[in-house]
Structure formats: C-alpha cells, structure tokens
Amino acid sequence: MADFNGVVGVAEQRNGKLQSTSLEVLTVARKIADDLGTEVTAILLGSSDGDTPAERGADRVWMVSAPELEHFQAGVYNQVLGHLLAELKPEVIVGAATIAGKALFGRLAANLGTGLASDAVAIETDKEKRTVAVTRAVYGGNAVAQWVVRTLPQIITIRSKVFGEAKPNGEKGEVIQKDVPRELFSSPAKWLKSAEERGQSVNLSQADIIVSGGRGLRGPENFAMIDGLANALGGAVGASRAAVDAGWISYAHQVGQTGKTVNPKLYVACGISGAIQHLAGMQSSKCIVAINKDPEAPIFKIATYGIVGDLFVVVPALTQKLKAQNE
Amino acid sequence: MNIVVCIKQVPDTATIRFEPRAERVDISGATLIINPMDEYAIEEGLRLREKYGGKVTAISLGTKETEETLRTAIALGIDEGILVSDPLFEGSDAYVTAYVLAQAIKKLGSFHLVLFGKSSSDNDTAWTGPAVAEFLGISDVTFVKKIEEISESRARVQRMMEEGYDLIETSLPAVFTVVKEINEPRLPSLKGKLKAKSYKVPIWAATDLGLDSTKFVKAGVKSELLRVWVPEARKGGTIFQGEPEDVAAQLVQALKEQQII
C-alpha cells in the first residue's frame, strides 16, 4: 500500500473549457486528500483556456498537450492516463461520470487492473483503512448502494451537480507539462467531428433547471411552449419516454431509465404522469414542480409543488409571470 | 459479419417492491427480464445480419435462470445463445464480469463486432462494455446512437454526447454500447418463439473458458458492496389551486422564497 500515494483528479475539457463536473471532481479530490492528509494532482489532457485546476484546489497539475488530445478519444485518453498513472501511483483517482467519463474510466479500470465505484452521490473516507466508500443510486434511484474498491488505485466517478464546483482559492499549484511517448496518441478509434444538437438546451446533466414535456403535450408543435418556459427560467428542455417515442422530440432530451439521469436544482414536469421509469431519472432533483390535469397522477406524490390544471393554460401563464419578473 | 451481443438478466424495476428504509432490496418477487437497453443491442445485431449476412450470438453471464433470457433472445432471432455460468462467478463485480465475458468472446472465435446496451437497469454502471474491449485489446465506442457506415474491417458511428454527438471512425473488431435512439426493437416472431422453446442453451463453465480457480483469483473481484438500502420515499408537497394566473404567481413566489430561482 505504501507504494501508492496521493489523490488524482482527472479534469475534462471541451474546446479548451474546463467542464463543470470537472470542477466538482476537484472539490471531491481535495476533500479526500484532506481526509487522508495527502495531496491532489490534477491531470488535464488537451489545452485549457487559462482556467486551471491549479487555482482550484489542486496542489499540482500535470498537463499533456497534443492535437490528438483536444477532443475526447476514449482509447487515446486511456493510454495516456494509464501511462501517467503508472508514474504517479495515486491511492485514489476521481473522475466525472459524464458520457466521456463513463467511456473512459471503465476501460481505465481494466487497464490498471483495479476496481471502479461509479456515479457517486456521496463519499465517505475511512481514514484508517484509507478507502473511499461511494454511495450510488441503483434500481433507477429506488435504492441506494454503498461500494468500496478494494484494490489500488481506487477509481471513483462522481455524478454531476452533487458536490459543488471548486472555486479559485487564491493559491496556485504548480503546472507541469508532461511529455508522453507519441505512440500513445494513436488508437484504432478516431474522433472525426462533434455536432451540436439544439445547443445548450439539450445538455441536461449540466443544467440547473430542466423543463420537461410529456404525453400531455399532445403533439410536437407544443414543445414550443416548453421551450418558452425553459427560456424564461434559463433551463434545458427534457422529455418523457412517451414524447420521445411518439417522435415529438429527439432522444437526447429523454429523462428516465432508458434516457438520462438528471439532478437539477429545479425540475418542472409538464403533462408527465410520472411512470416509475421516468421518476428513476429525475427523482433526486432538489425541487420538483408538476403540472398535470390529473390529480391522481403519480408525479404529484413526489412533487415539491404541484399544480392540478390544464398545462395549455398554466404553462403560458407561468412563462408570462417569469418574463414579467425578469424585465 | 459475425456479431456477439452481451446481454444481462435483470429484475424489472417496476415489479420490485421497495420497502422504505429496508436494508436490502428484495427481488424474489420481481419479473426477470432482458435488461431493457440490451434489446437495442440485439435489434442492431439482427439488422446488421439481415444486411450483411453472418451470425449473431448472444452471451450472458448468470445463473440457470438466465437461460430464459437467452431463450427470449433466440425468440427475437438471435442464432445462438450461450450461458456463462459457474459457482466461481458468484459475487462478481463489473470487473470480473467483463473479464469473464472477454474470455467467452475469445472462445467463440472470430467476430467483427460486440454489442452491449449502454448500461443495465439495476446497477447502471455502464462500464462493462469498455472494460471488455480493454480485456480483448480492441477499440470501443460507447453510447452509439447511429451506425453510419460499416464493413467487416471499419465502421463510422455517432456517439451520443451531452450536447449532441461525436462522429467516430474505428477499425473492427470493436465493442459498441448502444443507446435507445439507434433503433426500434422488434417483437419475437412465432417462428422464433417455436425455436426458442426447443432450444438447448449451451452452458460454459469456468474451466471451459480456461479459468481455473487460482488464475481466477488473480483477476478477482476488485470492489465490494458494503450495504444497500431503500431511502425514505420522497413526499409530495404543496398543491396550488385556483385560477392559472394566481397559481403561477404562487408558484413563482414559492420558488423565490426557497431561493430556487
């Protein structure tokens, strides 16, 4: 065990910008390092626009810059990280359970011959045993399980919007440019391009506010109303499986068991009855607002605030009210 | 084109009774089904076979009960369904599961593509597929929402990302995990159901995969489940009633007071 030391936070950048979940990774890495009385090394692959983990709680940053690392490529990232981690030998590796993180860390665990406890919504450090127990949702959030990795390094990934972003703390860690062998930059899978779909409005896992529409909308044209409310709130647009399966909106917006799991500050469900599969994807939201004409709809059983009424009247009224307040 | 689809038997979440504050999840009364996301992997395998010929084999790691899930895959049109089962595999974590699946895929011989559903409805870790790819030493693309082009040696696919998708080109063989958007799964055919009824599921044990217990310990379990519990059910809160303008105003005020907006 003595061979392994310190905590690594793996930061993710997109187009040179540190991702919000990566800032949460730094929060968690710092917390674990403080619990264990050790240091945080942040690893950043690709360039960053100046915002650096070094100013957000990392004692040092290892950076590898290369054109091949500008865009996320699971195979290449896995090889480069594997190389750096063999040198660093940390006790704990913290990463984000984003789509890229889910692609990367499973492969990395197999690569390093160690375990992974993914999707943490809470962590608990055992200072004696120097282990980190991870609490995660199972069975679509209907139950909770606590896992611990028994091998080193322990890899954990964290869910977005749970731990809070690390803020600049006025100190600056050392930034070290690392060179790695060129052959690590080639992989049988290559990134060709990224395409955006309805821009930010679809990035549900990073959204603080989500407004979702369901079967109650009756048709695709009425998603304009959901867009309007989401706009007024500055939020993203979600949907139930029923609305996606009907072809009213793309799958990227689907919240629930076969779609995305989200954890926003505010979730507004419009015309969504609240099937267990939908609740699985959103019931950990801090505040849930339900608008539905059926007072018996299961969504009301978990909603912080409910409005029993016709969404075609209530949603525009709400949008108006918010717009008036914003002006 | 030879395709392997890895499937998992899971309890249907909707049929599990979650007792509030219980220190376990009792799945004894639940209906066992194919992991819902795996249905899309099966469907994609079948569509590729229909287009390019070849064979689609399903593999599942599980207990004797998992035979039923493989039979369901056969009913859907899968050519062969193999159960990987051994008392040695009990208590496997995702690491061991991936390791064992990789050995089973190797035993099958030549293949072009291994398909997974993006994640399972019970543990939802989403990392068995990428780990299998690592153990096989081949590339993987996760969260595939569309296969744009494919041949026996290359594929170009769209991987779903938070804000859209990435276009990825990879050589084959490779592992893909697929999301729901990729297709619409079919229902079992009558012919398929008849085949499934009389289908004898081959069972591969640890020794069939060259995994003796000493070797297996080396690859052994890396993580431990400490405990499981059912959280207190979320409770409903305030219901606003009245004219739309009034309820809208009440809601906005409540959200402001709670500093949510």
Image (cartoon, helix red, strand yellow):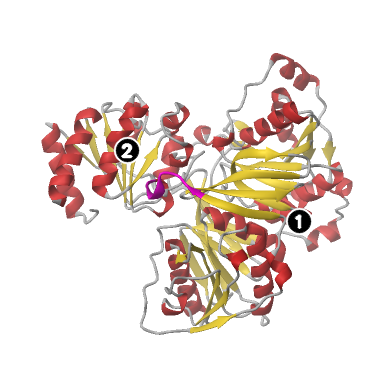
Q: Which chain letter goes with mark 2?
A: A
Instruction: Residue at 41%, 59% (x, y): give it.
Output: A162
Determine whether, in the image, residue B224 is placed left or right of residue B215: left
Q: Is residue A198 magenta?
A: yes
Report which residue position mark 1 lands on.
B135
1 and 2 marks on the same chain: no
**Residue stretch in magenta:** A195-201
Residue B102 drawn above or below residue B217: above
Which is nearer the eye, B173 or B40? B173
Return the x and y of residue A126 as percentages of the image width and height: 53, 72
- Label 1 neighbour load within 10 Å: few <14, some 14-19, many 20+: some
- Label 1, secondary structure: give it: helix
Q: Is residue B117 left or right of residue A38?
A: right
| Host chain of mark 1 | B
Q: Residue B42: percent from the left, percent from the top?
A: 67, 33
Magenta-drawn stretch contains A202: no
Position of the N terminus of chain B, as image quadrant, is top right
Residue B112 bears which disc, if any? none
Which residue is the site of mark 2? A269
**Label 2 amino acid?**
Ala
* Residue drawn at (36%, 83%) of the image: A170
Badge 2: residue crowd in 10 Å (few <14, some 14–19, many ≥20)? many
Q: Residue at x 54, y 44 (%)?
A: B25
Q: Cβ–Cβ below 8 Å for labels 1 and 2? A: no
User: Can residue B119 be seen from the camera position used here?
Assistant: no
What is the x, y in percent for residue A1? Answer: 67, 78
